[in-house]
Every structure is written in structure tokens, then in C-alpha cells.
Amino acid sequence: MTQLHPETYREAARKAIGDPVLQKALAGLQARFGRGAAEAYRRLPEGPHLRHTAHEIRERAVAHLDVLLERLAEKIRQNGGHVFFASDATDAVEYCIKVARRHGVRRVVKGKSMVTEEIDLNEKLAAAGIDAVETDLGEYIIQLAGEKPSHIIAPAIHKTRYDIAELFVKNMGIPYTTDPPALTRAARKALREEFLAADMGISGVNMACAETGHITTVSNEGNIRMATTLPRIHMAFMGMERIVGRLDEYEILLRLLCRGAAAQTMATYVSYTAGPRRPEDSDGPEAFHLVVIDNGRSRILADPRFREILYCIRCAACLNVCPVYGKIGGHAYGFAYSGPIGAVVTPLLTGINRARHLCQGETLCGACMEACPVAIDLPRMLLALRETLAYGDAFWKTTPANPLEGLAFKVWSRLTANRRTWECFLKAAALGQRLFPKKGNRLRRLPPPFHGWTRKRDFPSLAPETFLARWRKNEIEVAKDIP
Amino acid sequence: MECMTRTASPSKVTLFIPCLVDALWPEVAEAMVRILRHLGLSLDCPADQTCCGQAAFNGGYRREARRAARRFIEIFEGAQCIVCPSGSCVHMVRRHYPGLFREAHPWRRRAEAVASRTYELTEFLVDVLNVKDLGARFSGRITYHDSCHLLRGLGVKEQPRSLLRHVTGADFVEMENADSCCGFGGTFSLKYPDISAAMVNAKVDHILSSGARTVVACDAGCLINMAGAMSRRGISVNALHIAQVLAGVDFQRTCPF
Amino acid sequence: MIPPDQKAFLGRIRQALGHAPHESRNGSHLFMQGPSREELQILERYRQRTAKDREELLEQLMEAAKPVHLCVRRLPDPEAAGAAIAALVQEKAPEPDTVKQVVAWRHGLIDGLDLHLLPEQSAVRVHRTPPLDPLMDPARRHAEREAQRRAIAKAHMGVTAADFCMADTATLVLRARPGQPRSVALLPPVHVAVITLDQILWDMKELFALLRWEARFAAQGLSRYMAFISGPSKTADIEATMVHGAHGPREVHLFVVASAPGRLQYVGQRSTFSALTK
């Protein structure tokens, strides 16, 4: 399902922009969560500055990942849990299938997990004859529709109640209704049966705490609690960076996560799991497996330019404020991660040249950085990615993405190195612009690389004389009083 | 903030003219000149300045940007106080120039020195000169668009608003999502014109629903983008640089559209 | 002893961070050896808490409960709480897939609610969830566990205690213990939790300070499985319309008992199997 190409990006973006239902849903989502998160940060007792404290916590954790993961694994094993360290997607998937086969698992229920999207777990389980049912209502809806999530915490925002009604009638045989509570009840009933019948529950990990040896999962629906309580086996997948050292550090991150993700002070459910149930416990899984996934992360860790992206806690706050995401939605990003976080992390995980359009297709407006609960400087990393594409980069094995553009900037550099040359260039351009259709002072059509602009916008024509030329000639009027 | 040295008011100001203003919209620079002279400041404008290099920098072309930065620093480092009618150009100089040079490099200190003396016009007026009322007049309803680098990069939010509130006759209203990006993003608007156009059209819709007849901003890039979209859609809302409003110039004649 | 997957994995991380790949680093400075100054203050505040402070915490809790739709009621004693539950049982109709049955934890405070009177009063069955004997034959234990699970899945109301409730966010804190299945607070459409006034804490900082350093809580720590529950299950996945009861309970009621007989104080902390089966 990975769709990474500038043209597919442009095409998906065009499609999204032309979909009025999606546009309305995206605007609503951003108005609610984007503004809400900012307000929630302001109301923190410590104030919005807590984001920077959280940044330091994440920085410390990532700098000591080996120590923290070692401690976590030790604690979980003490409790009778299993920990597997997967160096890539294949490792992780194979481990999952191996455990599933050993326990005779046929049906799997899943709580939302971005890292399992990243490793394409569902498809690979299906290929191994294991059905994995997504149980987050939004994920369930898009799974029925055969699609991919378009938002980290609101995966089905692109679906209307009418789409969902049709899907449910077709797949569950319920009488037609477009009433959200009735549709939710229908899904509850269908999924309840899945939960009770499943042999294995798969979840992600919102954050692990090394000190106590717990992984925690956060949800509002309760599906993750179901998936990690009812089936015989619980397998949790975590990106290797999703850990902090201490409980007091965890406390700060959880508060910020809830605020960043959904402008809540606390999510409805937060579960702390340290291992399987004990023999005398009435319920809970009899086996617990934690799969820690690298899949390209240690490479990012090794590069100080991009290490900061590993501080991310996948709350989606940046999606909720990004003006580009607000127009093109999640699918255009072509990978598990969308929005500003996707624009940085996808190229790093899948190849910078291949996903070059993601880091170039952003305006550097900085809204993401202000919304990030751990104050990650996403614009800085977008620029650093662009630099690897401008000149090529040995560490990331990138090649110059657009030699023509590179040449253009070299020429530009020459032209602007001298005022006289620059002015000659502007004069030539002023002459050249006469060739193009004009209306009054506006240019209606321009040649490449400006032709895209004039498809939907006019462009001002160059002034007959630059400001500096007139300044030199002392033509700038001496001020009278401002009227 | 490292740049906010509120020493005695400077008497001499060096003009930093953004390349877009210089070539496409010189009226903005003229308006700035008019304002600063009105305030009794003596002005200097280095005649060989060209461009701060922001477009190259944002495209990832750091080497070319560094070359532009060196040139800029050489031209401007003698200046006491550098003023520019653009948030994003000042952002480039103040926030990005020092980082173009290694910590110990002699250019780093020179870049920091120039960065600390460079101001965006409205922050210069309000924070340095402590001027909010220029005695300007205007008639009609106006709204203000926050440009990204000015707002989030330099933290300038209230300064332009308080200047606009002091313009006699101007009915200042806030539009919805005033702080969201207009979709210009330099070369972004050329590489991804459809996305950029969708963004600017959303911005234009907010301008329209505010009921304002004039939209004001502190960056020529945003204004050219918004004005270009409105012109194509046949909308007769004026896009004006804040300097033009404050200088009270006849905008009908000097607006690029 | 270290599995090869872990060795290679952590080696890569150490290398990426610029350290020797095969040497474990000392990380003791990353963890707390004792309570921080802030935590000491929090613990002191907890220990000095007066009856008046507790009433204030309850007020704060009730305020925070509103936006998350947690229904909080203050009741004078366990008897009144039992009566309130009986009234709720009467009032709440079962959902299509549940029957009018109550499933209740085996827990000191819940035992004191006299729920055994319910069948006589209203012909509603009450299932209790006795702890499983770890020495029992595994097949029998499995059968008992399955029977409990069926009863929980069928019941329309689940009654639990809680370890704490955080006033700041209206969050119940439940730690796993034998005889107290987590699914009682999850599967039935209505969840009723009963706590005593002194179980209300200020916030997560206080909770974690107690779980880390206050001896009688720290022994169990966060336990094998701890759940935070803030109101009913929610979803807004269909056109951003808020719906309660997506998967978990549609309603959550919290009864705060103002004064419980001495023997019930902190009974929730008696966690061992023997203590509960005496």
C-alpha cells in the first residue's frame, strides 16, 4: 500500500482538494482539535512551556535508548512476558506469525497501531491465513471499505455517515440507518463477537516506562482494553523510541499526549501492562509478547540532524494544524504516517529520494512545531531533508533530486552576487514579460516553472524600474506628513 | 529576545529591501521610506543589495544561501539598525543566518551581530520606537493576515494589529484563521500549485467572510499570493502592505493589482 | 543469557549513539533512588489531608466528572451505596445482548454493599467473582474462568471498587488483583464503581508518588495491569458525532462512600489470595 511518488502525491492531493465532503471534514477536524490542543496547552498548570520540558525528557530517553529498552525487557521477562527485538518489518511479522501458529491462532483483533501499519502487518497476516480485524471504530470502517487510515487518531474522517451506513448494511446485514449512535451500536455488537472469539489481541504502544517495566496504551473507545484483556494472547508492537525512563517523566508525556491528540486532559482509557495474567487472576491474556521494532530507526538515531524526529509520540497534533494536511488529507502521503510528521519520517524510513515530494510539499509555516506536545522542530528537519536532496548525501545515499533546479539556484547565486548583473537580469525579465498575456497590471499566463501558479492565480508584472534604481537617482519623494 | 535591545531610539536607519518588493512592488518600499522620514529618521539604503537568499535556503540550497548571507552581512554589518518590510526576510536573517556558519567560524559572530540589528518594520515601529499611532487615515473595513515567519518565527502578532487599530477611519476586524498559512511558501507555490491554490483560496474565503474590503499583511509574498487569487476570482478586495496603509498612500494607484 | 536478537538490536543503538556496541551502559542515574523534593511535598500533603480537604477534593472531582460524563454521587455509608445500586439496577434496562444481571467484584467494600439482597428485592441475579485458587487443577481453573467470563459478558451492570480516583481529571484507577477481573469494568454496558472518600487523590502526580514511595501502595506498585478510566467509552469516528458506549460501558457511575466502617478502610490494598478468601 506504500504509494510514494511525486505524481501520485499530486494526483491524490488534487482528488482530495476536489472532494467537498473531505474538505469540510478536514476543516472541522482542524478547527476542533488544532485550536483545542493549543488551548489545552495554555491551561496546563505549568503553562505551555511544559512542551519544552517534555522535549528534554524525550531527548534524554532517546540518548539512552539502549539502557531503557534493556531495563524494560528485563522487567517484562521477570513477569513472565516475552520481548522480541525486531530489526526490520520482516523480523517483526515473522515473529508474530510464528507465535500465532504456535498457539493455533486463527482470529486476531487489533487496537489501532501506527507501527503495524508501517510494517504492513494486516496484509502479511492475511497472507499467512490469519484474519486480523481492526477494532477502533474508525479503523474498522475503513477496513470494511478496503482502505487505509487517513489520520492517526481520526482514521475515517473522510467517510460520511451515508458511506458508513452502506458499508454496514452490506457487511453486517443491518437495516439501513444513518444515525451515528445506531451505527456505533451495530459496530459494537459485531466487534464484541470478534473480541470474544479472538485468540490474539494486537496493540501498539503509546509509551513504555522503563522504571516500572510497563507499556501503556491509550484509547477513548475501550477497544484496546478489550483486545488486550479478552484474547488468550496479547502482542504489543512498539517503535523502539517509544519509551521514557521514569514515571514522573511519563506523567508529563501522558498529559501532553492527551492534550495534543484530542485536546483532552485525560483519555478515557489508559492501560498499563507489565506482563501476562497470573494463574490466580480471573482474566487477562495468558501470554504477553512485546515486539520492539527498529525498521530504520537506528539509522535515524545515528544522524544528529534527524535524531529529534525520534522524540515524536505519534499524537497527530501536527496533522491537526498543518495547512497542507488540511487540504490534501492523509491518503496523499502514501504511507502510514501523514501530515508534517509523515513529511519528515516517511522519507527517513523509506528513502529520501523516493519520498522527496513529502519534504518538499510543505510551506515551512511552522504551525506543526507550535502544536507539537514535545516541541519537535519539524521545519528544521524538512530543510535538512531538502539539503540532502539539493546536493546528495553520502550517509543517506541520496542523489540530487532536481539537477535543473540546482542549476537554476547556481545561476541565481551568480546573478544576485552583483547588483548590476541582477538589475540587467530584471530588465531582461521585464522585457520578456511583454510576451505573455496581461490584463491591466496582471500576468495571466507564465512559462515554466511559473506556469502552475498562473493556472489559478494572477501574477504581478515587474515594475518598470526597481526601487533601488529609483533610490539611486534620488527619485523617492521626500515625505510630507502622512495624511 | 536577543534582538530586542531597547537602547535609545536610533536616529539612522538602514533599509533592507526584499527582492520581491524591489522588483515587483516598489511602492511598499516607498511607503516605508515615507513612514520613517515622517518619524524624523535619516535613511540609508545600500544600493548594491540584492536578495537575502531565503528561496535558496528553503529549497535546501544552503551553499547558495550562505553565499547570499555573506554578501548581505558584508553590505549591512556597518549599519546600526536595519529595517525591512518583510517578516520572512527578517526571519531569514535573524533566525537562519547564524546557523549557516559553524559555531567557531568568524562569520558566525558577524552573522549574529547583523541578525541582532535587523528588524521587521512593525516591530521596529512598536517595540523600538514605541510608536503606535502614525496619524494615518483610512476608510473602510480592514482585516489582517499573519504571515507565518513573522508570527511564529519572530513572535510578532500584536504590533501590526495595534498599528492598524490606531489608523483613523479604519474598521479593523479579525478574520477566521488569520494565523494559518496562505499557501505561498516560496517555491512550494510553484512545485505544488494545486495545493498552494487550495490553501490560498481557503484564505480568500476567510477574508471574504470577514466582510473586509482590504486585507493587510507584512509580507509581499503572502500579499502577491492572496491578491493573485482574488484577482483571478474577480474579487475586488484590496491586498495592501501594512506600510501602504500606515503611510496613507493612494493605494488605488499603487496596489500591484 | 541475552537473546541474540536483543544483543544485535541494542548493539546497533549503542553504535548509533556513539558508544561501544557490546557493552551495557550504566543507567542508574536515569532512575530515581528516592522521592524527589516535589514528591516529598506531595506525600506530606497526602498524609496531612483533613476531612475538609477530602470534601474539597470530592467537589473538584464532581466538577471534572461533568465534561467526561462520569456520574458521581456522594453517599453516607455502604448501605446507602447498596440501595443506590439497587435503584440503578431497577432503572437501567438491559442492552439487546445482555440480561438484567449484575456482576460484582469480590472486594471488602463491595461485599459490604449487601448486594446479595438484590435477588430478593428485584429478582435480579448477582454474580460474584471469587479469586481463582492457583493450586487448583488447571482444567478446573480454566472452566471457572470461562464461567466467570460468560457471566461478565452477559451482565448489564458491573460493580467494582477502585484503588483511587484522581479528582483533577475524574479518573478511576484500578489495579489488577485476584477476584477482581478487569472485564467487570469493561464488558457490561453500565459500570458502577464504589470508593470511599479517602481514596480520592488530587492528580496523577499524587498517584504516582504514592505508587512509588508510600509503602502500603508501593508494595504492589502499578501491578501487573493498571487501568485509568475517565467516564464512559467514547467515539467520534462517525462524522465527529460523540457517541458513548463504543466498546466499553455506555454509562459509568461512581458512588463515593463518605464513611465506611473501620474494617473496610484500605481493604482494597489487601491483595493476597489468602487475605481475600479468609
Image (spheres, helix red, strand yellow):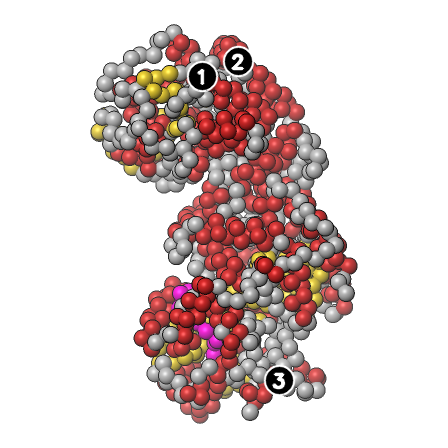
Type of amino acid under label 2: Asn
- Asked whether the viewer can see residue A386, the reply is yes
Where residue B205 sits: x, y (%)?
A: 39, 36
Q: Is residue C29 left or right of residue C36?
A: right
**Looking at this view, is B156 or C244 the one in front?**
B156
Q: Is residue A236 left or right of residue B125?
A: right
Q: Which mark is residue C132?
A: 3
Q: CA distance from mark 2 to mark 1?
A: 15 Å
Q: Secondary structure at mark 1?
A: helix
Q: Which residues are magenta?
A: C159-170
Crowding at label 1, few (<14), some or many (≥20) Cα neighbours within 10 Å? many
**Looking at this view, is A113 or A375 the one in front?**
A375
Q: Secondary structure at mark 2?
A: loop
Where residue C262 sits: x, y (%)?
A: 41, 87
Q: Residue at x 70, y 83 (%)?
A: C138
Q: What is the chain identity of the residue bearing mark 3?
A: C
**Looking at this view, is C113 or A143 the one in front?**
C113
Q: Secondary structure at mark 3?
A: loop
Pointer 3 and pointer 2 on the same chain: no
Q: Residue at x 55, y 81 (%)?
A: C271
Type of amino acid under label 3: Leu
Look at the numbered discs 1 and 3 and tell me whether their residues touch, using CB distance below 8 Å: no
- Asked whether the viewer can see residue A24, the reply is no
Is label 2 or label 1 in front? Answer: 2
Where residue C265 sits: x, y (%)?
A: 44, 83
Q: Residue at x 48, y 52 (%)?
A: A53
Q: What is the chain identity of the residue bearing mark 1?
A: B
| Residue C47, picture quadrant | bottom left
Q: Which mark is residue B23?
A: 1
Q: Which mark is residue A418?
A: 2
Residue B176, relative to residue C87: is it above or below?
above
Taking the magenta stretch, the answer to whether it contains residue C13 is no
